[in-house]
Each structure stands twice: as C-alpha cells, then as structure tokens.
Amino acid sequence: MSIDSRDDHPPLARPAPLGRGMGGWQFFRNNWLALFSLAIALFGLGYNTYRNETTEQQRNVREAAFVVIDALGELQQLADTRFFGGDRSEANRIAIWGRVTLIRDVAGLVSHSAGDRAQSLAATWEAQASAFDRGDRDAERTFAQAVAASRAQVLADLAALK
C-alpha cells in the first residue's frame, strides 16, 4: 500500500445541501443554537453601535455647551468692563464681537433652541451697541438679559442630557 493511496481513508461525510435532503424545518432543528447565537450577536452589534453613536453625540453637545458657557462668561465680563468700567476702546468692542460671533456659531451645535438664543443675543448686541456705549441703562439690561437667556438655555440643554 502506498502512503498516498486514497483507499486507506474513509470518505468524508458531507452534509446535504439545504435544497436536497434536508427541509427548512429540519435545518432549523439541527442548527437552532447557531442561528440563535447569530441573532443575539447581530442584535448586540446593532445596540452597541447605537449606544456608541448616542454617546458620541452627547459628548459633542457637552463640549459645545462648555465652550458656549465659557464664552458667555467672558462676554459678560467684557460688556461689564465696557459699560461699568468705562473701557470704550476699539479692542474691547472687537473682543465683544468676537465672543458674540463664537457663541452664535457654536450654540447651534448644542441645540436648535440654544442656536436661536445665540442669534437673538447677536441681534441684541448689534441693535444695542451704540446705546450701550452712551451709557443707556436699558441697553445694558437688555443685553444682560439676552446673555442670561442664552446661558439658561444652554444649561437646560445640558441638564436634559442623560
């Protein structure tokens, strides 16, 4: 007998294809555990992907919210320095516009409502800047209320995240 002889080994048993010899029900009965495991694995993969996407979205909202809160604080300081401290320099005006623009651009990433409040804040500053510089108390109050409304909306959006 030769070593390479195929007669020395019994033929391998091959499973019958699904269409011949084994009906769908028989196939299910023979492989139910594998099919169940596959279904669980697919469900787990889908749920894990969903949770990862949700977590990433909330992380982005938090990051944007913290940037907006920080910029709102700086904006309030700059505005108070301009109104109460008498710093009516062009550098101060440019810094205020820079903060207003940053808030307007980033707040929309927090929520639609925060974006609307930021747009309103920008419009308020644009409308009240000249009166603000003249020492008009109503202009200062209107602007401070717009800043407070933006801050409250961003904080509410942060609190709504779970």
Image: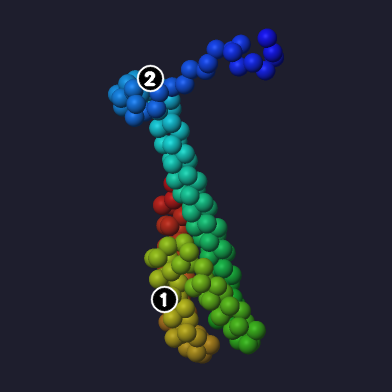
Q: Position of residue 52 (x, y in %)?
A: 50, 46
Q: Is residue 26 visible?
A: yes
1 to 103, vertically: above or below? above
Question: Pointer 1: residues within 10 angstroms few (<14), some, or many (20+)?
Answer: some
Quarter of the figure with residue 7: top right
Which one is in front in this view, the residue at disc 1 or the one at disc 2? 2
Residue at 55% from the left image edge and 12% from the top image edge: 10
- Dots 1, 2 in contact, CB < 8 A: no
Q: Residue at x 43, y 31 (%)?
A: 38
Q: Position of residue 129 (x, y in %)?
A: 50, 86
Q: Is residue 150 visible?
A: no
Mark on residue 90? none
- Residue 82, located in which quarter of the rendered image? bottom right
Q: Amino acid at mark 2?
A: Asn
Residue at image x 48%, y 49%?
A: 53
- Compared to residue 39, the image places residue 64 above or below, namely below
Q: Residues within 10 Å of mark 2 (few under 14, many from 20)?
A: few
Nearest the eye: 1 or 47? 1
Inspect the image, locate mark 1, and give the three-letter code of the amino acid beneath it.
Answer: Ser
* Nearest to the observer: residue 105 or residue 133: 105
Q: In which quadrant is the N terminus drawn?
A: top right
Is residue 9 found left or right of 161 in the rendered image? right
Q: In this figure, which residue is indicated by the disc labeled 2?
A: 30
Look at the image and name its color scheme: rainbow
Q: CA distance from mark 1 to mark 2?
A: 66 Å
Give percent across and percent down for residue 136: 47, 86
Name the residue located 31 percent from the left edge and 27 percent from the top edge. Answer: 24
User: Residue 67, position in %: x, y?
Assistant: 56, 63
As drawn, the label of residue 120 is 1
Of callouts 1 and 2, the N-terminal one: 2
